[in-house]
Amino acid sequence: MVNGTLLDARNVLAVHPDLGTLRILPYAPKSAVMFGTLHDNMSTGDLSPLCTRGLLIRLLETAKKDFGLAFSVGAELEFCLFRRVGDTFEPVDHSLFASSNTLNEQEKFISDLYAQLKHQDIDVETIHTESASGQLEVVLDYQLDAIKLADNVVLARETIRACAKEHDMIALFLPKINAMQAGNGMHLHLSFRDLQSRDPTENSFPHQTIRGAMSLKAESFLEGLLQHLPALLSLSIPTMNSFRRVGQGCWTGHSIGWAIEDKEAPLRVCVDLASGKATDVEMKLSDSTANIYLELAAILASGLDGILSNAKLRPMFVSGSTVGDELNKLPTSLSESLECLRDDAYLLDILGPELSTAYIAVREAEIDNSSDLTIEDEVQIAIQRA
């Protein structure tokens, strides 16, 4: 056990299956997968405070009961395809963003991947090439149920890895593979619905009458994210390698701020081209090394904190401006973000003492074990584990 987690080998937790999540795996057709929640196995049988899927379920129940809100969430999964060349692995190509090369050359893989995802009831909006060598992005459809979206993310990553192997490739989700190229993110798109309105399925993020504007509740939600953003990074980009992807000009955001349709802002408000409505906010500082359940619970809780306090949204971020850079500076390392988490009493309360203590201890142990690794070392480890 990692020192400082306060965990030991006693009181093994039991998994309570969620039968509605049963899926036959198309890449292993004699096998199935099912999600569940962790429960105390020795006394009460209660949901374990260490269960991150259970944490997200509880958070969504609180949003419904106390706020009358339900969340809609989408995700974009970026990854790079590598193939063995002699004794090493290399990217399958060196094409650029929107190039047809990868799409054409990997057409069989992409078609098989799409079919395998659909087989598991995972709706895909699009699959397209990205900026790095051999890089693709799978955009998962918006889900009205955030738990289903989180489950879909886990299933999609497993399917991408398995399908790549069927085509004699490996898929790497490592956030930064090449210091001179774009990294792999897992951007999240967030909006909410008012369950007490006349149409509880209608998006409550946009302003009802002002084109391109957000509702007052959406502005407060966004401000809540901004207030907790430094601590959130310890959960959404939670590895040493994750922070290699972040920086000015990297389209990830590097300071606390928001903007409308500006990819350099960490929180980008997206506008529908047809209607002109502000549809959602995109969280760009997120990648596939995060626990999606823990990350989503913390992000949505931060937004709810803003709504509860009727937080007033700060002025919009302006690309290229250096005004307030020091005041709005984001953590530049995992250790800095963990310190921000320690100082964020609200998020610590959301996680609870058991989970927050264990999480911080594990991440600090990872820092100790990986602080001397180069990016080349990290890539080799990712290849070995792929």
Image (spheres, helix red, strand yellow):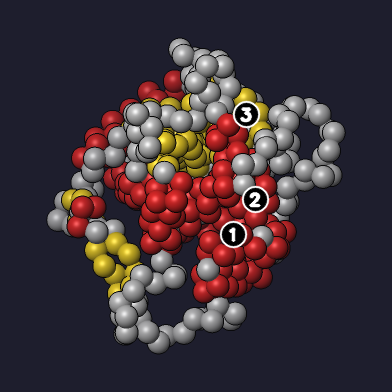
**Label 3 packing within 10 angstroms: few (<14), some (14-19), many (20+):** many
Q: Of the residues tagged 3 and 2, which is closer to the observer?
A: 2
Asked whether, in this view, residue 301 is left or right of residue 114, the answer is right
**Residue 143 picture quarter:** top left
Residue at (53%, 47%) from the top-left corner? 304
**Label 2 packing within 10 angstroms: few (<14), some (14-19), many (20+):** many
Q: Of the residues tagged 3 and 1, which is closer to the observer?
A: 1
* Tag 3 residue: 263
Res 86 seen here: no
**Residue 128 picture quarter:** top left
Amino acid type shown at disc 1: Leu
Asked whether, in this view, residue 255 is left or right of residue 57, the answer is right
Q: What element carries label 1?
A: helix
Q: Vertical placement of 41 versus 362: above or below?
A: below
The mark that comes first in sequence, 3 or 2, is 2
Q: Vertical placement of 159 versus 33: above or below?
A: above
> Quarter holding the C terminus?
bottom left
Asked whether, in this view, residue 121 is left or right of residue 284, the answer is left
Q: Vertical placement of 202 versus 44: above or below?
A: above
Q: Where is residue 10 in the image (x, y as percent from the top left)?
A: 40, 87
Q: Position of residue 210 (x, y in %)?
A: 56, 16
Question: Are discs 3 and 1 less than 8 Å apart at CB?
Answer: no
Q: Is mark 3 on a helix, strand or loop?
A: loop
Marks 3/1: CA–CA distance = 26 Å
Question: Are discs 1 and 2 less than 8 Å apart at CB?
Answer: yes
Q: Which mark is residue 347?
A: 1
Q: Is mark 2 on a helix, strand or loop?
A: helix
Q: Residue 228 carries which label?
A: 2
Q: Nearer the viewer, residue 179 or 38?
A: 38
Marks 3/2: CA–CA distance = 20 Å
The mark that comes first in sequence, 1 or 2, is 2
Residue at (73%, 47%) from the top-left corner? 330
